[in-house]
Structures are given as C-alpha cells and as structure tokens.
Image: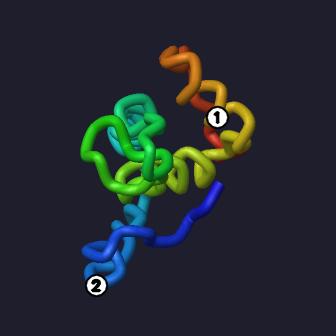
Amino acid sequence: MVDEPVDAMEKVLGELPMPWVVTVEDVRLAIRAVLVHVPEEWPTGPLCRSDRTPYPCLLHRWGRRVLRSRGLPNDLIDELATRGETLVRVPDGGR
C-alpha cells in the first residue's frame, strides 16, 4: 500500500493532518473513509470509487493512518476495506 500523494492536487496541498488526539469520532470517520474510498479497476489503473482519483486517494490514506495509530494492523484494515464490514470494537492501543 502506497502512502504518498499520487494526485496532482494532493502534491500541491499535501496530506490531511492527523488529529492531535485520535478520538472515537475520528476512528468512526476513518472507518467510513476506508469503507467508502475503495479501489475500482479502470483501464488507466485503480481509481477511488468515490472520487475517481488514483487509488489510494487522500481520504483513504488518512483513514488508514488514523486506524494504524490506534493499533489496527494493515491486514485488518485491508480486510475491512475488502469486506465492507464495520468493526465492533477498536483496540485502544493500551491507552
């Protein structure tokens, strides 16, 4: 998974900043971003199903960073994005 800007607009604006403190609401938004901004195959390569920018898009990458900051491993995030299921409990990373 690539975690760097691939869209021309993102190269100018940069990444979305991480919240200072990741709250439950941030985690909910991150899960939604990962579920909504999934890849869709196009002749030019994978594009975000939601905004048609090169995948992984800005919001998908932000969602992944937030979820990783709370202790979710990449394989669980990948499974979440693939299966489209919601998490029942988000690990608090020992906090």
Q: How many badges with numbers are in the image?
A: 2
Tag 1: amino acid = Asp
Viewer-closest of 72 and 95: 72
Q: Please give left or right for residue 68 compared with residue 4 in the image.
A: right
Q: Please give left or right for residue 85 compared with residue 7 in the image.
A: right
Q: Say which residue appears at 65% left-offset and 26% top-offset.
A: 79
Answer with the quarter of the image where residue 76 lies.
top right
Q: Say which residue appears at 49% left-offset and 18% top-offset.
A: 84
How far across and down, in percent of the image, does residue 33 sit?
Answer: 37, 39
How far across and down, in percent of the image, does residue 10 sit?
Answer: 32, 73
Tell me the residue that label 2 is attached to: 12
Q: Which mark is residue 43?
A: none
Inter-mark Cα distance, 1 to 2: 28 Å
Q: Please give left or right for residue 64 compared with residue 16 in the image.
A: right
Within 10 angstroms of label 1, few (less than 14), some, or many (20 or more) residues? some
How far across and down, in percent of the image, does residue 62 sit?
Answer: 43, 56
Q: Residue furthest front?
A: 43
Tag 2: amino acid = Val
Q: Say which residue appears at 25% left-offset and 74% top-offset.
A: 9
Image quarter hosting the N terminus: bottom right
How far across and down, in percent of the image, does residue 82 sit?
Answer: 58, 24
Viewer-closest of 68 and 38: 38
| N-terminal-most mark, 1 or 2 | 2
Q: Say which residue appears at 31% left-offset and 76% top-offset.
A: 8
Viewer-closest of 95 and 47: 47
Tell me the residue that label 1 is attached to: 78
Question: Regarding mark 1 in the picture, which secondary structure is present there?
Answer: helix
Answer with the quarter of the image where residue 11 lies.
bottom left
The coloring applied to the image is: rainbow
Question: Regarding mark 2 in the picture, which secondary structure is present there?
Answer: helix
Within 10 angstroms of label 2, few (less than 14), some, or many (20 or more) residues? few
